[in-house]
Amino acid sequence: MVEGKPKSREELKRTLKRIDGKGYKFYRSLKGCYAWPKYLLYVDHVQSDPFAPPSRLRVRVPQKVAGFPKDTYHNKSREIALRDFLTRCFHDACKKFCGGKRGTGNSGLITIEKPGQEILERNSVIVNESFVEARFTAGLPAHGRRIDGKTAETMFSKEIPRIVEQSLIFQNLDGEKLYEHVEVAEDADYLRSRLEEMGLIAFVADGSILPRASGVDPRPMDRRLAVPFRSPESLRVKVELPNRGLVTGMGIPKGVTLIVGGGYHGKSTLLKALELGVYNHIPGDGRELVVTNPSAVKVRAEDGRRIEQVNLTPFISNLPRGQTTEAFSTENASGSTSQAANIIEALEMGAKVLLIDEDTSATNLMFRDRRMQELVPKDREPITTFIDKVRQLYLEKDVSTVIVVGSSGEYFDVADCVICMVEYVPYDLTREARKVAEKYPSERRQEGGESFGEVVSRIPLPQSFRFRRPGRKLKASVKGVHLARLGDHVLNLWALEQLVDIGQTRAIVDALVYAGKYADGKRSLREIVEQVLRDIEEKGLDVLSPKISGGYAAFRKFELAAAINRLPTLKVRLERKG
């Protein structure tokens, strides 16, 4: 952090004039704090050359100038939403007032993290009673590798002031949109907090727009084309929200819920909305009041993933040649083995809801019918299918499941609720499904045993978090939302479908390094992860790195644990009771 008395903006201008035309390294002399009439400008990091990652800057506006009413950030929900809103405003202002690329590399660009459809806690903007601070990046301009001082002076003296004026001063913003943003988030948080007492795992408001513009565009489908969500009367519940007042919608009860229906009728669309219902959504997204239990985890098959000493016996046991699955490890898991591990690992971290789509599942883990049971007896089949375990999960561990099923009616026997999607409209066909099950009784044998089985905690060994070679600086980079590099290791997170923002991935990568301080060979994986989350809760996302940046977005413990589980360096020992 830059310390000391701020320099004047005139001094910044003189410095730029003095170094104009010199080698790029002379930009380093800009590092420091400068006083503008309405804000302080911090130059925290200066890039090494025009092609390097851009320089990191901050502007800090005193609250007496910014003027944000306390009711826009007086609780955690509103504060997070306000910071998200201001990040969006700053990003839009950058596009409006920045002159664009001017020179070599990324010269002349000014930008900030671009949020998506979700309202996430970020460190791109900080708001408190004293000030509002925005953290952004700028490509310091150059021609070749020579400093373009005149363009830099324009950026600092004209463009950044305009961006600040139009994005961080309350009186210059659309107050109606700002309040709508924070109130939508507050309502969603309140609704999510009520699910447990209402006996629900999720809620989908009437009128929600669930379909997206396309498979690669997360914005809502054109409302003229989309079918607004309408709850079946038997599942409709009412709830009073702090801002919107009384709303109605479909409540999905605890237990085992099936989502059925024909192809292209909206089964997976509904499940996708539920898996992202762990996050709040921006006004106009269509899913503002689609909320899910915050401990819901989407699980799927993940061929090829690494598994490190996971107790798979609830699903896989009695392997040929006496191999044990009590501490199963592999560098290249099959579909069924990987999905079983994903389920056990989610339970290990305290998941209370599992979300499953048969399209992305291993068929041989989901069920096997009577004919296959007859041909291949259980004593020759190591896999115990999910259909034989799903009710045990609920009755013994209070873990609910939502499954998209389109091919097997066998699940009717274990379901508490059956929702049928017809042209994107849900119908409660629970009674009808039970009648079908009575009319066509299943001949398959239950193979789940007397209980679900033990979920064993694992204790990561300290060497699991040693990513740096001796004498070498640790290099970490994020290539996308689901791909990163940590030292010599590639971290592939493609199966984590609830990871939605590259800022989350950046934070997770640094959290992997940070978590090493708690890996003492005694703490369980869950204890380590939850301690990291407690530190973030108490000290903010900045705790993850000594560098000041605005590139982080908050993540859940499930995604951090999943990243740890996929580390090539992970080594654990199992924690046994007694």
Image: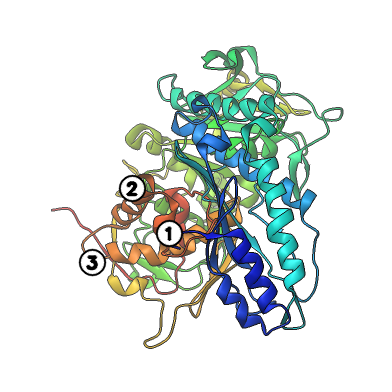
Describe the element under mark 3 as helix, strand or loop: loop
Element on which disc 2 rests = helix
Q: Quadrant of the N terminus?
A: bottom left
Query: Relative to residue 141, is residue 244 drawn left or right?
Result: left
Gap between marks 2 and 1 measured at Cα: 40 Å
Callout in the foreground (2, 1):
2
**What residue is rendered at 41% in x and 59% in y?**
544
Task: First in sequence, mark 2 or 1: give its number.
Answer: 1
From the image, tell me which residue sits under label 1: 382
Q: Is residue 63 above or below residue 381?
A: above
| Foreground tag (2 vs 3) | 2
**Which residue is nearer to you in this view: 93 or 536?**
93
Q: Quadrant of residue 263?
A: top right
Numbered circle sitting on residue 534: 2
| 3D distance between C-alphas at marks 1 and 3 | 32 Å
Q: Residue furthest left?
A: 578
Q: Which labelled disc corresponds to residue 521?
A: 3
Answer with mark 2 or mark 3, whichever residue precedes in sequence: 3
Residue 384 lies, in percent from the top left, at: 44, 51
Task: Residue type at mark 2: give it.
Answer: Arg
The residue located at (41%, 38%) in the rendering is: 352
Type of the residue with mark 1: Pro
Quarter of the image where one finds residue 15: bottom right
The answer to whether residue 400 is left or right of residue 51 is left
399 with respect to 102 (left or right): left
Amino acid on which disc 3 is placed: Gly
- Coloring scheme of the render? rainbow
